[in-house]
Image (cartoon, rainbow, N blue to C red):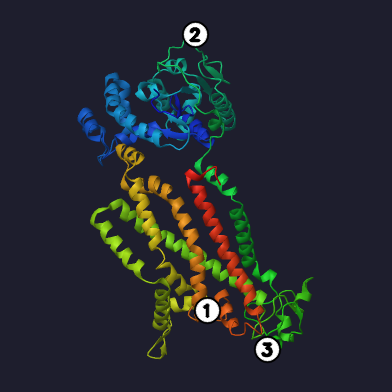
Amino acid sequence: MSRWPNKYVIGLTGNIAAGKSTVRKILQDLGAYGIDANELAHRAIGKDAPGYERLVRTFGESILDEHGRVDYEHLSARVQINPSAGKQLREIIQPIISKAVDLLVQHAKQDIVVIESTNLLEYDIALGCEAIWTVYATAEQRVARLMREHHLSETEAHQRIDAESPIAPKLRSADIVIFSDGSIERLRQKVEAAWSLVINAEAIDGAAIPISTAEEVVLPPSRPRPIGKKRRPLLDQSVAKEARSPLIDVWRTFRRNKAAIVSVAALAMIILMAVFAPWITPYDFDKGSLSVMYAKPMSAVTPSERLLKECHWAGTFLERGCFIHLAGSDRLGRDIWSRTIYGARVSLSVAGVAAATSLIIGMFIGTISGFAGGRLDEAIMRFVDFLYSLPIFMAAVVLQFFFRSYHWARYGVRVDTLLANLDVALGGLLFIFLAIGGLSWVDTARMARGQVYAFKQMEFIEAARVVGATNERIILRHLLPNIIGPLLVVETLAIPGYIFLEAALSFLGVGIIPPTPSWGSMIGTGYSGLRSHPHLVVLPSIAITVLTLSFNFIGDGLRDAFDTTLRGKV
């Protein structure tokens, strides 16, 4: 029975400064899950880590610096001059590393795992490796690398290399030997060649295969295997050849959703139109003339001399557009096409800022609540429940009236403040951002709290704790990357609600400050003349429908892509 069923584990070893970390990173780029056992060993004996107290009892406080942390250089020197000290250190570290690696391998989403360790053959995790890769470099190259990357003197670099274990046992145990000559490009080519051999099962059970090794590498005729078992081929060759990162899986699933891809294209087109609005519209959104009010779509008009001078297309090959209102004009003679395009900036700003605000606040509060638990979690969730009970539309209306009445007038006297001036400069968007962003994060917080509460009890979090990871590191490096996908889906599906909320506020006159165009305010002003002038509401209605449907379909596509149970069925 394999130690790690359904996983093909590569043990990556070699002497110091030979390029093992570079090989591991290349393998990760090719689709493998990488584990740095050397880093795990350092964390296992770090301050407040599980092996710290036993290490101090064994070696004394002389291995600590003035801050109580382990002086790794001093500890390494003691181990190099005293073989029994090395054995004691391995007895402390090995159980911790073994447990952590077990949990990390079992949690890995990839089918191929690579474990990097300078002392791999001295640990019991070597017994679970399906293949041993040894990275070799000449002493001169390793000295140069230590001097360049670790800022050691030439004497110190030679002493460090002379004190380490010989390379011969690692070469005898290797299925694949890779010689590193200092060139990253050539090293990548050799690793890719070795990767191809492994996934095609050509390196299994044969003699060690040197990949462009140097003449200095001499493989002994006999190769005793420390692993003690026959190498097995990959359980699923097709999976190995398709090994890839989870993000690639998400993208491949997402791109099969035709509605989502069309929606991405539609959203990209709207964004581009909003960005390049001055170039694709004949007039600014606030420019108009009463002489051309209520003009029909595509009807020829004679704009005033003042308005003609303000036309963006005057003097260009599009100049004829200055005499035609493509989508008609409103009751003040303003071009509806121009106002609709500029109005996209408002809706996109609300979508982006409100979603980002909701995501950041909700993720922060939900993560703290779920990770802390206890009374803090209870208090936060009761506050969230209170906010959840408030009708967001009515609360947004009240907040809009409060912000603007407080900052704009007090006892009939206008009070200019930084916030009020900024709100005017943004066309009334500031307080909309505050109203929507300040109330819409409760669903995100609930989702984040539930995700964190579930993940923090899983084995890979226990592995992180075993090697001494702090709470901050667990949250930032392990929890957030796992919960961000579902939260992005929730926020994407919530964006249409934010857009409709802004449109409704502007429709009622408590949203965007005129003359800044908003699709909601355009529909509101044109609604009264719907029978006689339907063109006033047609274009903004189509625009808001296309934008909200795009976000809905994109959200559906992301939900299916992040749901691993649906992959291959979409």
Quarter of the figure with the N terminus: top left
Placement of 454 over or under 177, stated as above or below: below
Of badges 2 and 1, nearer the viewer stands 1
Label 2 packing within 10 angstroms: few (<14), some (14-19), many (20+): few
Name the amino acid type tagged 2.
Pro
Q: Is residue 418 visible?
A: no
CB within 8 Å, label 1 to label 3: no
Q: CA distance from mark 2 to mark 1?
A: 85 Å
Of badges 1 and 3, nearer the viewer stands 1
Which residue is denoted by mark 3 in the rendering? Answer: 290
- Residue 78, x across and y down, in percent: 29, 25
Name the amino acid type tagged 1.
Phe
Q: Secondary structure at mark 3?
A: helix
Q: Who's the residue at 72% across and 81% down the image?
A: 296
Q: Earlier in the sequence, mark 2 or mark 3?
A: 2
Q: Secondary structure at mark 1?
A: helix
Q: Who's the residue at 52% across and 48% down the image?
A: 561
- Residue 534, x across and y down, in percent: 65, 80
Left or right: where 419 falls relative to 336: left
Which residue is denoted by mark 2 in the rendering? Answer: 221
Of badges 2 and 3, nearer the viewer stands 3
Left or right: where 406 falls relative to 295: left
Label 1 packing within 10 angstroms: few (<14), some (14-19), many (20+): many
Of 229 and 39, which appears nearest the observer? 229
Q: Farthest bottom residue?
A: 412
- Residue 2, x across and y down, in percent: 40, 24
Which residue is denoted by mark 1 in the rendering? Answer: 507
Q: CA distance from mark 1 to mark 3?
A: 23 Å
Q: CA distance from mark 2 to mark 3?
A: 97 Å
